[in-house]
Image: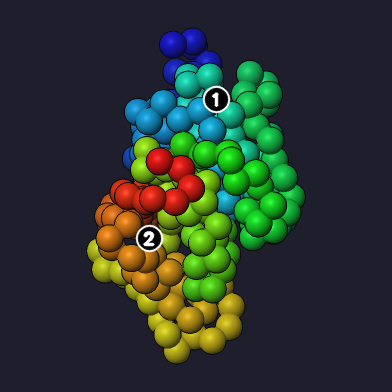
Amino acid sequence: MDPNMNTLLSSILNDVLIGSGDSDKHLLTLFSIAVSLGAKNILELGVRDGKTTLPLLMAAKINSGKVTSIDINDTTFNPPDDLKNLLEFKQIDALEYLENVNKKEVFDLIYIDDWHAYKHVKKELDYIDKIVSPKSIILLHDLMYGNHVPHYHSDLTLKDGQWAEGGPYRAVAELNPQFWEFSTIPVNNGLTILRKKYTNLYHS
């Protein structure tokens, strides 16, 4: 492994151990899952400052892959020079992107951490169903938001805003268990690992 990658991994490990960010403890998990999958086609929904984009890019380099990052807002993230050509950032609403993406394309790994309202996440998952296979992994942040770790959190009293109508947990919990399975790492608001285990539609 090249020295720059070692430096980046050390930095990420430091964030995991002592970082105070709301997803810091998941950074090595993102990297490890992407590497172990051999993920070449990675999609990130929600970028912010690129904290989670970096480990995905590092994995993409190892796997000779690429990362497509989507956010309705611009990002301040400036990737290291040797990773720049692996990243395609699109400033667009995630639902618009997913509606128009080529449905023949299959993503190996998708990370979701954008707008968390129930209807938004439910619609994302409806679209994502068409661009993943049983070999793909979907990661979702914040199913245990609001200091509710290790318990899922879904507030049906909220009618508007980021966590409206039950938030991301409701969207995942309503998936048909005949076709989907999920489990959650109970730290840092939760990192949920979702997989479409069987389908006779779209990609096998």
Q: Residues within 10 Å of mark 2 (few under 14, many from 20)?
A: many
Q: Quadrant of the N terminus?
A: top left
How far apart are the two marked residues, 1 and 2, measured between alpha carbons?
A: 28 Å
Quadrant occupied by the C terminus: top left
141 sits left or right of 91 in the view: left
Depicted 93 relative to depicted 102: above or below: below
**Label of residue 65 in the image:** 1
Horizontally, residue 136 falls left or right of residue 104, namely: left
The image shows residue 58 at horizontal and vertical percentages of 51, 26
Work out whether residue 17 or residue 124 is closer to the camera in this orientation and state it: 124
Percent of width and height locating residue 180: 32, 56
Callout 1 amino acid: Gly
Residue drawn 38% across the image and 60% down it: 189
The residue at the far front in this view is 200
**Which of these two is toward me, 6 or 100?**
100
Q: For this view, does 151 lie left or right of residue 189? A: left
On residue 189, the disc is 2
Q: Earlier in the sequence, mark 1 or mark 2?
A: 1
**Residue 40: where, in percent of width, then height?**
51, 28
26 and 33: which is toward the camera: 33
Q: Residues within 10 Å of mark 1 (few under 14, many from 20)?
A: some
Residue 158, horizontal then vertical, whole percent: 49, 85
Residue 178 shows up from this direction:
yes
Residue drawn at (55%, 57%), measured in percent from left and top?
127
- Is the Cβ of the residue at disc 1 closer than 8 Å to that at disc 2? no
Residue appearing at x 65%, y 32% in the figure: 87
